[in-house]
Image (tube, grey):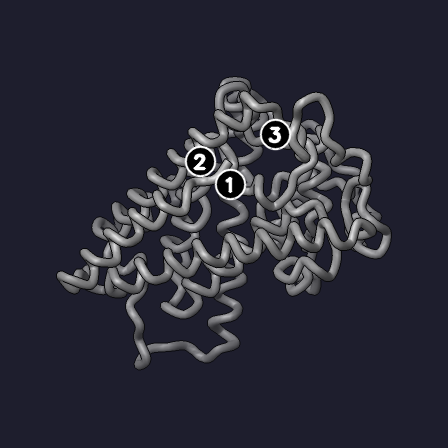
Amino acid sequence: AVVSTQSTGTFLAILTFVAWRWSIRVTGSMPLIDVACAAWGLSALRRFYNNYLEAVFCAYPEVRTQSIPEHRLKGGKDLVGRDAEQLQQMIYHDRLTFITQFFLELFIYFTMPGYYPAYDTLNILPFPLRLVKLIANHYIMSFGMYWCHRALHKNSWLWRNIHSLHHWAKHPLSRTTYQDHWADNFGNAIVGHAFAQILLPLDYTMFWVSRVFRVCESLEKHSGVSGGWNIAHTAQRWLPFAQMPHHHDWHHEGHKGCNYTFTSIGGIWDCVFGTRRCGRAPERTQTTQDLKSSGGEVSFFDGEYTCFIPLTLLTCVVVSKLSY
């Protein structure tokens, strides 16, 4: 269930032509043509990296997070456990995801000058400081996505009508990464990249480095393999409490009260808020924190409505920053 190449190409071709023909640029932001070209590049990256991860899955069964029998075709279901009707719904939501994300990015570009940072060679920080800022930005991003994800599980209406669709994939592969209800993807785009960029803006280069890294990281966490082949996750293993794809895979297997983080370094939030579990990862991929954590404890924030408190507070901070 993927948006057709023709549909994606049509939207991006129109955007590219309009941006180039009229040299559109919002004051304080990069030219719109840069955004259009990056959209082409990220689209190609998703396809290439998805193929890479699924090739690893097929070629190296020893690094899979689940055993071979669990991925066998059963009862008219696909490799990840979805039936034909569910796949048709995914096609519908996949198309809506592309359309809503496309117009969300345009809306942000034209209403929030500077969100897409202009290329600036005069006021650029030293590289070590830019790297620290990128890491801090990702911690903020993962905080918002952690609590959005947790709320999608704890609020019965959100779970029943929105997030449960993503969990039709009991044995995820990288192809299932963005196969959610369109509103699920829409909300994560706002509380993730958007909130983080508003609160701690990245410069031109790091902005796109962040986007590229997050595409790879997102595909990896649903890849069904855990180890050195996961380039983005492996690059972050030196950071405190970093997670690997086997954590999110365990979450999909049915242990939905744990491992809510969407990023590797976001593993710190699962540790802080008591929701980290190791899963059945190969011993060589387990972290020190895996061996210490039991996770899954019920807390005040697991209530039907109290789960929204952290996300509401974060939203208030973002609104204050925008109003300042």
In the current view of this chain or complex, which residue is farthest to the right?
283
Q: Nearer the viewer, residue 150 or 84?
A: 84
Decide if residue 221 is in sight here.
yes
Circle on res. 98: none
Count neighbours of disc 2 (C-alpha within 10 A) and say few if under 14, some if 14 to 19, many if 20 or more.
many
Q: Which residue is mark 1?
A: 178
Is label 1 in a helix, a strand or a loop?
loop
Q: Which residue is mark 3?
A: 167
The image quarter containing residue 258 is top right
Task: Mark 1 or mark 2: name the one nearer the start of the chain.
Answer: 2
Q: How many marks?
A: 3
What is the distance, in whole Å, between disc 1 and disc 3 at their CAs?
12 Å
Q: Nearer the viewer, residue 246 or 298?
A: 246
Question: Mark 2 or mark 3: which is in front?
Answer: 2
Q: Is 21 located above or below residue 218 in the figure?
A: below
Going by the numbered disc 3, the residue's amino acid type is His
